[in-house]
Image (tube, rainbow, N blue to C red):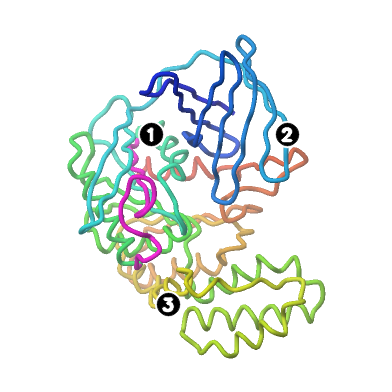
Amino acid sequence: MTMHVQEDSLPGRYRATFDSERLRVTGIPFAAVDVQGCCDVSLTLRGDQTTAVFRGTLHGDSLSGHFREGEQEGTFAYVRAAGGARPFEEREVTFSNGTTKLAGSLLLPPTGNSLSAVVFLHGSGAEGRWASRFLATQFVRRGIAALIFDKRGVGASSGDWRRATPEDLAGDGAAAVARLLQEPRIDRKRIGIHGHSQGGTLAPLVAVRSRHVAFVIASAGAGVPSDSTEIYSVLNAIAPEAQTAADSASARAYVSELVAVAYHGRPRAGLDSLIAVSKDRPWFFEPPPPENSYWSFSRILARYHPLEWWAKVRVPVLLLYGAEDQRVPAAESAARISGALRRAGNHHVTVRIFPGADHTFRLRPGPSGWPDTAPGYISTLTDWVARR
């Protein structure tokens, strides 16, 4: 892992980010850096679910100490190294979709014109530009520009993703494509999109909304109805807790009823009855509270049918899946989407399913506990775009 530390604009203040090839992250910011005296350093890293605090001491060219994340703790050690020149140019960019102001980063190779470019769409939840930064840098190293941006309501972007419709989110992606048309070093005819999970599911809508999309990469995009995807995902999440056949049957009934209420507006009485009789089951979880955006967004998402939009896509498509994806049914989604494309006359579709890989194209961790990326995942992405 590499940590980059630099002085902030305020005297005596610092900011830091970290990279990890193994974790497929780059430029992840620490929320706070505190330095006391000459040598005591504290760094705070806030994740989606937890916060980790690193406290260490500088000794010459080393920084070592202890960290804690929730109830877990461990040690860390860094050694100072000379900083190399950044292998790409990076600029802040802004653009709009209606009244929503969106902010992101444009990553460009240091040289070259008439560049191909990729716009990164977002997965579900509050996803900032940092989520796509690692893959973006992989493209830039191959001479392909990349635009990553904060989802509406995240980071420097206005709006609220919790209240957004699929059309709103697709409009944000189309606006990002339009923003690249203003860049003199980018070839207007070679701008594509990359979407993972929810982004891959909404990718065909973006491609239809923007006539400037020249290719589509859909990574773990759902090709089955949204309610079926939700049942598949939730059941896989709680399956390890189901200890008997009766547990499995009751879990399926509960999740099916929950999704029927959320996605199709079924009256709540049946779900409440199942909650009352399921509370002691080992797999049980409380449904989201009434004010949670899960309920409103599910009703909206239920009206989105990805195959209808895939049938309208006329540009080359790359479909990527992990064979052990527990969030999206990989083989079924790939078959449905590629079938819809081909029936509509688009035979420029490539499908790759990576054995043993999960929803994020990682393999089951080995003895070290650190994940490994599925062999060929990164090269498949960059090679395919380079050939376009």
Indicate the secondary structure of the residue bearing disc 1. Answer: helix
| Residue at the spot of label 1 | 140
Question: Which segment did they paint magenta?
Answer: 144-165
Q: Which of the 4 image quadrants contains residue 165?
A: bottom left
Label 2: few (<14), some or many (≥20) within 10 Å? Answer: few
Indicate the secondary structure of the residue bearing disc 3. Answer: helix
Label 3: few (<14), some or many (≥20) within 10 Å? Answer: many
What amino acid type is highlighted by mark number 1? Answer: Val
Left or right: 100 in relation to 373: left
220 above or below 92?
below
| Residue at the spot of label 3 | 299
Dot 1 or dot 3, earlier in sequence: 1
Q: Position of residue 25 (x, y in %)?
A: 52, 38
| Residue with the most extreme top position | 60
| Residue at the spot of label 2 | 74
Does the stretch in magenta take in 367? Answer: no
Q: Nearer the viewer, mark 1 or mark 3?
A: 3
Q: Which mark is residue 36?
A: none
